[in-house]
Amino acid sequence: MPPNVFVTTHIHTDGPIPGPHSLLTLTSTASSADGVLISTFSTNLRELPGATLHPIALSHWRTRADDWLCTRRSSRPPALAMTDLTRWIDKLPGVPTFVADTARPDYLFVYWYLQRFTGRWPFAGTVPDAELLDRLDCTAFCSLAGCRTPHAAPLAAIS
Protein backbone atom coordinates (compact mmCIF):
# COMPACT_ATOMS: atom_id res chain seq x y z
CA MET A 1 0.00 0.00 0.00
CA PRO A 2 1.41 3.44 -0.90
CA PRO A 3 2.34 5.73 2.00
CA ASN A 4 0.23 8.67 3.07
CA VAL A 5 1.09 12.05 1.63
CA PHE A 6 0.07 14.78 4.04
CA VAL A 7 -1.38 17.90 2.42
CA THR A 8 -1.49 21.10 4.46
CA THR A 9 -3.19 24.24 3.26
CA HIS A 10 -2.89 27.91 4.14
CA ILE A 11 -5.63 30.25 2.91
CA HIS A 12 -6.72 33.88 2.86
CA THR A 13 -10.34 34.89 2.65
CA ASP A 14 -12.49 37.99 2.65
CA GLY A 15 -14.89 36.71 5.29
CA PRO A 16 -15.62 33.89 7.75
CA ILE A 17 -17.59 31.44 5.57
CA PRO A 18 -17.57 30.39 1.91
CA GLY A 19 -20.43 31.46 -0.32
CA PRO A 20 -21.21 34.89 1.07
CA HIS A 21 -17.42 35.41 1.18
CA SER A 22 -14.58 34.31 -1.06
CA LEU A 23 -11.39 32.34 -0.91
CA LEU A 24 -8.66 34.69 -2.16
CA THR A 25 -5.46 32.67 -1.96
CA LEU A 26 -4.58 29.06 -1.39
CA THR A 27 -1.15 27.57 -0.73
CA SER A 28 -0.74 23.83 -0.21
CA THR A 29 2.21 21.59 0.46
CA ALA A 30 2.49 17.83 0.23
CA SER A 31 4.85 16.15 2.69
CA SER A 32 5.85 12.65 3.64
CA ALA A 33 5.10 11.30 7.12
CA ASP A 34 8.57 12.35 8.27
CA GLY A 35 8.02 15.93 7.07
CA VAL A 36 9.99 15.84 3.81
CA LEU A 37 8.50 18.28 1.32
CA ILE A 38 7.27 16.56 -1.84
CA SER A 39 5.50 19.32 -3.76
CA THR A 40 3.78 22.72 -3.47
CA PHE A 41 0.74 24.38 -5.06
CA SER A 42 -0.33 28.00 -4.90
CA THR A 43 -3.01 30.10 -6.57
CA ASN A 44 -4.99 33.32 -6.27
CA LEU A 45 -8.74 33.12 -6.86
CA ARG A 46 -11.27 35.63 -8.12
CA GLU A 47 -14.12 36.58 -5.83
CA LEU A 48 -17.36 34.64 -6.06
CA PRO A 49 -20.16 36.40 -7.94
CA GLY A 50 -22.31 38.26 -5.42
CA ALA A 51 -19.92 37.64 -2.52
CA THR A 52 -19.06 40.57 -0.28
CA LEU A 53 -16.11 41.64 1.80
CA HIS A 54 -16.91 41.13 5.48
CA PRO A 55 -16.51 44.34 7.56
CA ILE A 56 -14.00 42.75 9.96
CA ALA A 57 -11.97 41.38 7.06
CA LEU A 58 -12.10 44.79 5.38
CA SER A 59 -10.66 46.51 8.42
CA HIS A 60 -7.92 43.90 8.65
CA TRP A 61 -7.04 44.02 4.93
CA ARG A 62 -6.79 47.83 5.17
CA THR A 63 -3.80 47.32 7.47
CA ARG A 64 -2.22 45.02 4.86
CA ALA A 65 -2.84 46.86 1.59
CA ASP A 66 0.19 45.35 -0.16
CA ASP A 67 -0.91 41.85 0.82
CA TRP A 68 -4.44 42.58 -0.43
CA LEU A 69 -3.04 43.67 -3.80
CA CYS A 70 -0.93 40.51 -3.91
CA THR A 71 -4.08 38.38 -3.49
CA ARG A 72 -5.63 40.03 -6.54
CA ARG A 73 -2.63 39.56 -8.88
CA SER A 74 -3.14 36.86 -11.49
CA SER A 75 -6.33 35.74 -9.77
CA ARG A 76 -8.12 32.93 -11.56
CA PRO A 77 -11.75 31.79 -11.76
CA PRO A 78 -12.47 29.47 -8.82
CA ALA A 79 -13.43 26.53 -11.06
CA LEU A 80 -10.06 26.61 -12.85
CA ALA A 81 -8.11 27.03 -9.62
CA MET A 82 -9.90 24.13 -7.92
CA THR A 83 -9.56 21.90 -10.99
CA ASP A 84 -5.82 22.57 -11.01
CA LEU A 85 -5.62 21.86 -7.26
CA THR A 86 -7.42 18.54 -7.79
CA ARG A 87 -5.06 17.60 -10.63
CA TRP A 88 -2.07 18.42 -8.41
CA ILE A 89 -3.50 16.24 -5.61
CA ASP A 90 -4.25 13.37 -8.02
CA LYS A 91 -0.62 13.35 -9.20
CA LEU A 92 0.88 13.08 -5.71
CA PRO A 93 2.87 9.89 -5.07
CA GLY A 94 0.87 8.11 -2.40
CA VAL A 95 -2.42 8.41 -0.58
CA PRO A 96 -3.40 12.10 -0.27
CA THR A 97 -4.48 12.94 3.27
CA PHE A 98 -5.70 16.42 4.22
CA VAL A 99 -4.34 17.73 7.52
CA ALA A 100 -6.62 20.23 9.24
CA ASP A 101 -7.16 22.18 12.43
CA THR A 102 -10.90 22.53 12.91
CA ALA A 103 -10.37 25.84 14.71
CA ARG A 104 -9.10 27.36 11.45
CA PRO A 105 -11.24 28.09 8.36
CA ASP A 106 -8.95 26.23 5.94
CA TYR A 107 -10.87 22.94 5.93
CA LEU A 108 -14.28 24.63 5.58
CA PHE A 109 -13.21 26.75 2.60
CA VAL A 110 -11.20 24.04 0.82
CA TYR A 111 -13.98 21.46 1.25
CA TRP A 112 -16.69 23.87 0.08
CA TYR A 113 -14.72 25.13 -2.94
CA LEU A 114 -13.69 21.64 -4.05
CA GLN A 115 -17.25 20.31 -3.78
CA ARG A 116 -18.74 23.39 -5.45
CA PHE A 117 -16.30 23.60 -8.35
CA THR A 118 -15.10 20.01 -8.91
CA GLY A 119 -17.88 17.98 -7.30
CA ARG A 120 -15.52 15.88 -5.22
CA TRP A 121 -13.17 15.68 -2.25
CA PRO A 122 -9.91 14.31 -3.73
CA PHE A 123 -8.44 13.17 -0.43
CA ALA A 124 -8.54 9.61 0.89
CA GLY A 125 -8.98 10.98 4.39
CA THR A 126 -8.72 13.95 6.69
CA VAL A 127 -6.57 14.11 9.81
CA PRO A 128 -7.84 16.72 12.32
CA ASP A 129 -4.47 17.22 14.01
CA ALA A 130 -3.40 20.77 14.93
CA GLU A 131 0.05 19.61 16.05
CA LEU A 132 0.75 17.81 12.77
CA LEU A 133 -0.54 20.83 10.87
CA ASP A 134 1.82 23.11 12.80
CA ARG A 135 4.73 20.73 12.20
CA LEU A 136 4.04 20.62 8.46
CA ASP A 137 3.19 24.33 8.29
CA CYS A 138 3.11 25.66 4.73
CA THR A 139 2.88 29.37 5.61
CA ALA A 140 6.48 29.90 4.46
CA PHE A 141 5.33 29.21 0.89
CA CYS A 142 2.60 31.88 0.99
CA SER A 143 3.20 34.79 -1.36
CA LEU A 144 1.98 37.39 1.16
CA ALA A 145 4.70 39.24 3.06
CA GLY A 146 2.52 39.39 6.18
CA CYS A 147 2.60 35.62 6.46
CA ARG A 148 6.36 35.49 6.48
CA THR A 149 6.73 38.18 9.15
CA PRO A 150 7.48 36.72 12.59
CA HIS A 151 4.62 37.14 15.04
CA ALA A 152 2.21 38.43 12.38
CA ALA A 153 -1.39 37.39 12.92
CA PRO A 154 -2.42 34.87 10.27
CA LEU A 155 -4.77 36.59 7.87
CA ALA A 156 -6.90 33.50 7.30
CA ALA A 157 -7.65 33.24 11.00
CA ILE A 158 -8.77 36.85 11.16
CA SER A 159 -10.49 37.31 7.83
Image (cartoon, rainbow, N blue to C red):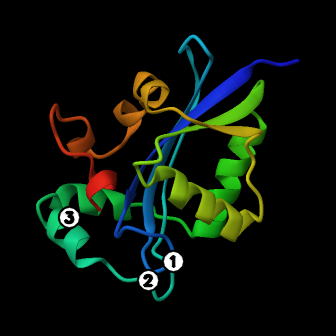
What's the CA distance linking mark 1 and mark 2?
7 Å
- Mark 1, mark 2: which one is toward the viewer? 1
The three-letter amino acid code for the residue at tag 3 is Trp
93 relative to 99, above or below:
above
Q: In the rendered image, which quarter is residue 53 located in?
A: bottom left
76 relative to 142, above or below:
below
Q: Which mark is residue 61?
A: 3
Q: Nearer the N terminus, badge 2 or badge 3? A: 2
Query: Seen in the image, is 110 located left or right of residue 62?
Result: right
Query: What count of labels does the image hold?
Result: 3
Residue 76 pos. (x, y %): 53, 65
Q: In the rendered image, which quarter is residue 123 located in?
A: top right
- Give the residue drawn at x 29%, y 62%: 159
Residue 24 pos. (x, y %): 42, 62
- Give the residue drawn at x 43%, y 32%: 138
Q: Nearer the viewer, residue 11 or 43?
A: 11
138 relative to 153, above or below:
above
Q: Which mark is residue 51?
A: 2
Q: Secondary structure at mark 3?
A: helix
- Give the residue drawn at x 75%, y 48%: 122
Q: Which mark is residue 19?
A: 1
Q: Secondary structure at mark 1?
A: loop
Q: Are marks 3 and 1 in contact (CB under 8 Å)?
A: no
Mark 1, residues whose alpha carbon is within 10 Å: few (<14), some, or many (≥20)? some
Residue 148 pos. (x, y %): 25, 35
The three-letter amino acid code for the residue at tag 2 is Ala
What's the CA distance linking mark 2 and mark 3?
16 Å
Residue 3 pos. (x, y %): 76, 18
Q: Are marks 1 and 2 in contact (CB under 8 Å)?
A: yes
Query: Seen in the image, is 108 located left or right of residue 38?
Result: left
